Amino acid sequence: MSSRCWNKPFIVFGVFFPLLASGCAGVGLHPPTKVTTASTVTAPPGEMGWWYARFRILWPEDVPPRWHMDLLLAVEVLAPVVENHRAETALWRIHRRAARDASGHQFSFIFYALAADAARIYTAIRNNPLLQELEARGDIIEVVFDDVSAVRKPNLEDTSDPNWSLMLQRSWPYYIMGVSELWLLLVTQAAESQAVGSIQDPSAKLAFYEKVDRTVQNSWRHEAGHALLHHLNAVFEYEPLLVEPRGSLRF
């Protein structure tokens, strides 16, 4: 069995200690442009809201999830969108999961923006030639966008875990955006360092991103303990963490 526990629900971005596992546009670090914790913890209804772009990925029976497909989508499809639409997206994040249920293996891009800007972002994703080719090949089963005719999730807390305190629900999107930015930068740099731009054939790209995935996972395995977990712990004064008996932490 895979050491990554692929036969159980597997949420990479969305737990307190996230399991960090792209055209190759460079991805810079920029603060949110339309939301500040000081002035707007709730967005006016009908204006900004949360939007999802969901990519359902082929996952044959009796094999592990093809996690490298997430990286391919991140670098080749989402990185240019993130960079080109920073002014319109106040917050964004990546969500990864694979479970033997109706959703299966699904990679999601979640962002906070005006409905009109969400429509433009959806168009940019939909018009990506590689994404269209992956759909035609059957590697991507389905791409699902939200209906932009109305804002249904206007508040900062609307996509956070409702079991959390309200102050954490409203703060968490900023944390997970930073985590997602870090992950996307790692993946993009790993791809660029191995000359992804010279590969055009989709099958060759898929094989290439398996190598990129191993590079990023190696960084997580050997560097995250200090670079990520230690420093997160330091921010919270090294206070002991209470793990609920029901097993709310998933590794």
Image (tube, grey):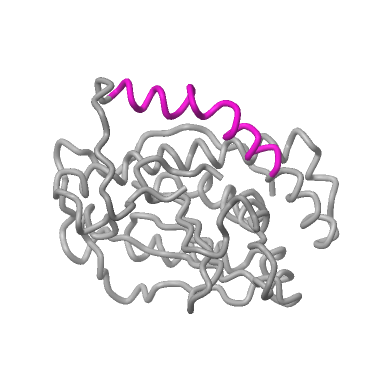
Q: Is residue 231 magenta?
A: yes
Left/right placement of residue 228 relative to residue 64 reads left
125 above or below 140? above
87 above or below 62? above
At which x and y percent is residue 3? 61, 50
Q: Going 71% across and 63% down the picture, which residue do you hit?
A: 130
At which x and y percent is residue 73? 63, 57
Q: Is residue 62 magenta?
A: no
At which x and y percent is residue 139? 70, 71
- State which quadrant residue 218 falls in: top right
- Which stretch did the figure color magenta? 214-235
Tally the numbered discs. Answer: 0
State whether the magenta stretch is mostly helix, strand or loop. Answer: helix
Left/right placement of residue 135 relative to residue 152 reads right
- Quarter of the picture containing the N terminus is bottom right
Q: Going 28% across and 21% down the picture, which residue do you hit?
A: 238
87 above or below 108? above
Q: Residue furthest front?
A: 245
At which x and y percent is residue 47? 23, 61
Q: Nearer the viewer, residue 166 or 63?
A: 63
Q: Going 71% across and 76% down the picture, which residue do you hit?
A: 138
